[in-house]
Image: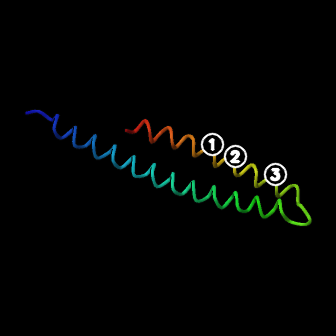
Amino acid sequence: MSHAPAFNRWRCAVSQAARQVLTARWRSTLDGLESARADYRQLYAATAVDVRAVRKAAQRIHELEQLRLVLARELLAAR
């Protein structure tokens, strides 16, 4: 008795679940990135610029962009 068909179904299900999780994380990261960019623009445009807050916002944007790159790489690898 061969277990190959069951294994293939299991592997396909796991791959599909992983793609769904990665896609959800991609969307969440993109939403967070858009929000962080809006916050940065608002902080930068303020009349009294809080340099510490602007730097923190810029760091958040950088971190989210790095995460987005990793997720994109993983999504392409999951194909």
**What colour scheme governs how the chains and residues are painted in the rendered image of this protein?**
rainbow
Dot 3 and dot 2 residues touching (CB under 8 Å): no
User: Which amino acid does the dot numbered 2 rest on?
Assistant: His
User: Which amino acid does the dot numbered 3 rest on?
Assistant: Arg
- Report x, y in % for residue 18: 39, 46
Q: Secondary structure at mark 1?
A: helix
Q: Which mark is residue 55?
A: 3
Check the image and name the residue furthest to the right: 48
Cα distance between the residues tagged 3 and 1: 16 Å
Q: Residue at x 58, y 59 (%)?
A: 31
Quadrant housing the C terminus: top left
Cα distance between the residues tagged 1 and 2: 6 Å
Query: Which residue is disc 1 drawn over?
Result: 66
Q: Secondary structure at mark 2?
A: helix
**Mark 3 vs mark 1: which is more N-terminal?**
3
Cα distance between the residues tagged 3 and 2: 10 Å
- Report x, y in % for residue 71: 52, 44
In the image: residue 60, left or right of residue 70? right
Give neighbour class at mark 2: few <14, some 14-19, many 20+ (Cα, 10 Å). Answer: some
Q: Residue at x 74, y 49 (%)?
A: 59
Give neighbour class at mark 1: few <14, some 14-19, many 20+ (Cα, 10 Å). Answer: few
User: Which amino acid does the dot numbered 1 rest on?
Assistant: Gln
- Report x, y in % for residue 48: 92, 65
The quarter of the picture where residue 47 lies is bottom right
In the image: residue 47, left or right of residue 76? right
Q: Secondary structure at mark 3?
A: helix
Q: Residue at x 35, y 49 (%)?
A: 17
The quarter of the picture where residue 66 lies is top right
The quarter of the picture where residue 33 lies is bottom right
Q: Which mark is residue 62?
A: 2
Quadrant housing the N terminus: top left
**Mark 3 vs mark 2: which is more N-terminal?**
3
